[in-house]
């Protein structure tokens, strides 16, 4: 799917005017199919392609990205995406996305897991 998206979307240097050919459904499918940490890099490239094409993401896209990060046991990446404005995930994230990722950071079975309250306190003034 990503190869087809790249063919339609082109690269940053060769931006085409066919931005509406990149459907959000393809991006959402890619996020739902993510089951390995390496696949998060593919999703990040796809998000960057959408950004270059000026295609806005939605609340659903933000939630699906956070869920993909948590599914591959990388909830801290999901949290950092919510706070990183360059990825544009945080601009569209709703309370569901925040609750989803924060509930998965504090897991006691993960060795060295940092408490969510401390992470959030570092991001926001509480």
Image (spheres, helix red, strand yellow):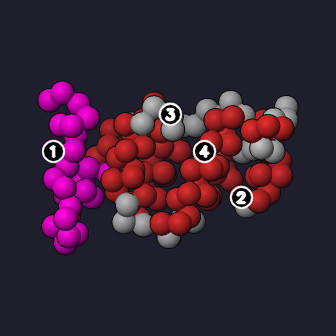
| Left/right of residue 97 with respect to residue 17 in the rendered view | left
- Is mark 2 in CB contact (under 8 Å) with mark 4? no
- Bounds of the magenta segment: 100-126
| Left/right of residue 122 with respect to residue 37 in the rendered view | left
Name the residue beneath numbered marker 1. Answer: 118
Residue 7: x, y in percent? 83, 52
Name the residue beneath numbered marker 3. Answer: 86
The residue sitting at 69% across, 34% down in the picture is 52
The earlier-in-sequence mark between 4 and 3 is: 4
Report the residue that reaches farthest toward the top.
125
Residue 4: x, y in percent? 79, 57
The earlier-in-sequence mark between 3 and 2 is: 2
Mark 4–mark 3 distance (CA, rounded to whole Å): 11 Å
The residue sitting at 68% across, 30% down in the picture is 54
Name the residue beneath numbered marker 2. Answer: 2
The earlier-in-sequence mark between 2 and 4 is: 2
The residue sitting at 45% across, 32% down in the picture is 85
Q: For residue 23, what is the image quadrant?
A: top right
Q: Nearer the viewer, mark 2 or mark 1?
A: 1
In the rendered structure, find residue 47 and report the number of the disc placed on it: 4
Q: Mark 2: which secondary structure?
A: helix
- Please say if 42 is above or below 37: above
The earlier-in-sequence mark between 4 and 1 is: 4
């Amino acid at each position: 799917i990503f190869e087809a998206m790249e063919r339609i979307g082109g690269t940053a240097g060769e931006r085409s005017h066919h931005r509406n050919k990149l459907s959000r459904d393809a991006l959402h499918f890619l996020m739902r199919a993510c089951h390995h940490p390496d696949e998060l890099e593919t999703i990040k490239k796809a998000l960057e392609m959408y950004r270059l094409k000026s295609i806005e993401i939605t609340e659903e896209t933000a939630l699906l990205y956070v869920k993909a990060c948590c599914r591959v046991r990388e909830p801290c990446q999901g949290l950092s995406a919510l706070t990183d404005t360059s990825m544009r995930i945080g601009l569209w994230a709703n309370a569901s996305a925040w609750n989803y990722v924060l509930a998965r950071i504090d897991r006691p079975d993960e060795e060295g897991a940092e408490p969510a309250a401390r992470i959030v306190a570092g991001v926001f003034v509480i």
